[in-house]
Amino acid sequence: MKILIRAFSTLALMLAVGGSALAQEYVKGEVVKVDAKQKKLTIKHEPLTNLDMPAMTMVFVVAEDGMIEKVKAGQAIEFAADRVNGRMTVIAIK
């Protein structure tokens, strides 16, 4: 049963990362902090309409480890975010 739950969780993550980034608009933001150890980015961003969130600064986890290496504090980015397994997640970065 645990293996089945893990398989469904993995499939849901793959769909979220692969599918919703194409359907979502990218939002402008600025990377405030990079926490490579925790795989988190603090981003000051414009409103996230798909998540019904106003502009603010908040912490996101990243969907893929390689995303952390693409950015640095102070960098302007465009990104897509979604809830993945209940966590605010950056699913794509331009």
Image (tube, helix red, strand yellow):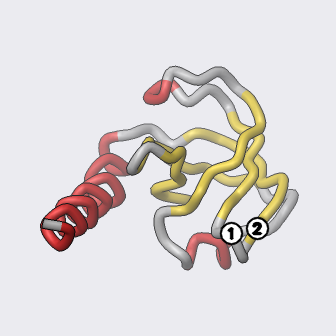
Total marks shown come to 2
- Tell me if 44 is positioned left or right of 94 in this view: right
Q: Tell me which residue sits at (25%, 55%) in the image.
A: 12
Q: Nearer the viewer, residue 77 or 42?
A: 42
Q: Position of residue 32 (x, y in %)?
A: 84, 53
Identity, as a three-letter code, of the amino acid under mark 2? Asp
- Residue at 70% x, 37% y: name it: 45
- Foreground mark, 1 or 2, reads 1
- Residue tagged 2: 35
User: Is residue 51 toward the left or the right of residue 55 in the image?
Assistant: left
Q: In this view, does 16 lie above or below 27?
A: below
Q: In this view, does 9 lie above or below 83?
A: below
Percent x, y for residue 93?
55, 59
In the foreground, 8 or 64: 8
Q: State whether residue 36 is above or below residue 32.
A: below
Q: Look at the numbered discs 1 and 2 and tell me whether their residues touch, using CB distance below 8 Å.
A: yes
Give residue 50's position: percent from left, percent from top.
Answer: 44, 28
Mark 2 falls on what kind of element? strand
Q: Which residue is drawn at 77% across and 37% down?
A: 57
Q: Where is mark 1, residue-wise?
A: 38
Residue at 32% over, 49% down: 22
What amino acid does circle 1 point to?
Answer: Gln
Q: Is residue 14 above or below residue 32?
A: below
Residue 94: tell me if it is visible: no
Left or right position of 64 against 28: left
